[in-house]
Image (spheres, grey):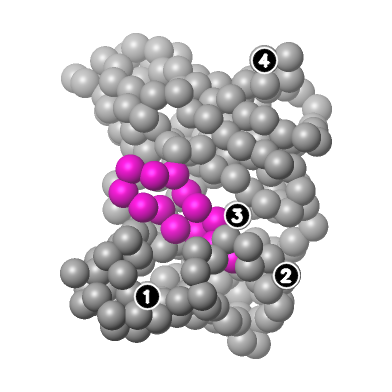
Amino acid sequence: AQSVTQLGSHVSVSEGALVLLRCNYSSSVPPYLFWYVQYPNQGLQLLLKYTTGATLVKGINGFEAEFKKSETSFHLTKPSAHMSDAAEYFCAVSAGNMLTFGGGTRLMVKP
Amino acid sequence: GAGVSQSPSNKVTEKGKDVELRCDPISGHTALYWYRQSLGQGLEFLIYFQGNSAPDKSGLPSDRFSAERTGGSVSTLTIQRTQQEDSAVYLCASSLLRSRVGSNEKLFFGSGTQLSVL
């Protein structure tokens, strides 16, 4: 069994501030981990993923995430928020034949 | 096509009616997935296809829901006797292969069908 918890259904930051979106997972086998982004009126896009190897993963648009096995976490960060980053972000885990999504976090960016 | 195409983009129906949602995956993609995103909820897995077969139907919420895929391409999700709780965005995704989800395979999502049951 696997599950994903995203802390904070809404996160608000000022433009230029650090973005931190939290994701914790549980999995009975080594997981693959993903972050997806959904911009308004668009489909989901893959931001980044961790499968094996380096635990710090860089994605598109300046986002990165670090896999921390000891903390069962895969938090998403970006050093400086842009207005265009406003969207819904989903963390997901794959540990077998199922891709399980978290509840999503809506990121709002204030000017 | 260039991406995963879903139709209609919006569907408003009356309670008790049947609806069909269509997904055209990227050409050549053998794996196809249906997800549902209800208001305020995360993505909920419904069903996936490998070719024309559906080895995992565990996510279908009730026997009112069914899906099929023909020719290893287009898939149709059918909801019979719709209820208000069926209102959601229904997302389709496809990937080239189905070994372990996402291992080296990228999922491509459509823009979804917004279903509203009045």
Q: Is residue B36 magenta?
A: yes
Q: Is the residue marked by circle 3 packed among few (<14), some (14-19), or many (20+) residues within 10 Å? A: many
Position of residue B17 relative to residue A36, above or below, is below
Is A43 situated left or right of B31 in this image?
left
Give the extent of the magenta segment.
B33-47
Give the letter of the chain under mark 4: A
Amino acid type for the residue under numbered disc 1? Ser
Q: Which residue is mark 1?
A: B7
Measuring from the top left, give residue B59's x and y in whole percent: 57, 61
SS for tag 1?
strand
Q: Which residue is mark 3?
A: B107
Position of residue B91 relative to residue B70, above or below, is above
Give the letter of the chain under mark 1: B
Q: Is the residue marked by circle 2 packed among few (<14), some (14-19), or many (20+) residues within 10 Å? A: few
First along the sequence among labels 2 and 1: 1
Q: Give the quarter of the figure containing the C terminus of chain B.
A: bottom left
Magenta stretch: dominant SS? strand
The Cα atoms of the two marked residues, 2 and 1, are separated by 24 Å
User: What residue do we see at 45% from left, 18% from top?
Assistant: A20
The Cα atoms of the two marked residues, 3 and 1, are separated by 19 Å
User: What residue do we see at 60% from left, 45% from top?
Assistant: A100
Amino acid type for the residue under numbered disc 2? Pro
First along the sequence among labels 3 and 1: 1
Amino acid type for the residue under numbered disc 4? Glu
Amino acid type for the residue under numbered disc 3? Leu
Q: Is the residue marked by circle 4 packed among few (<14), some (14-19), or many (20+) residues within 10 Å? A: few
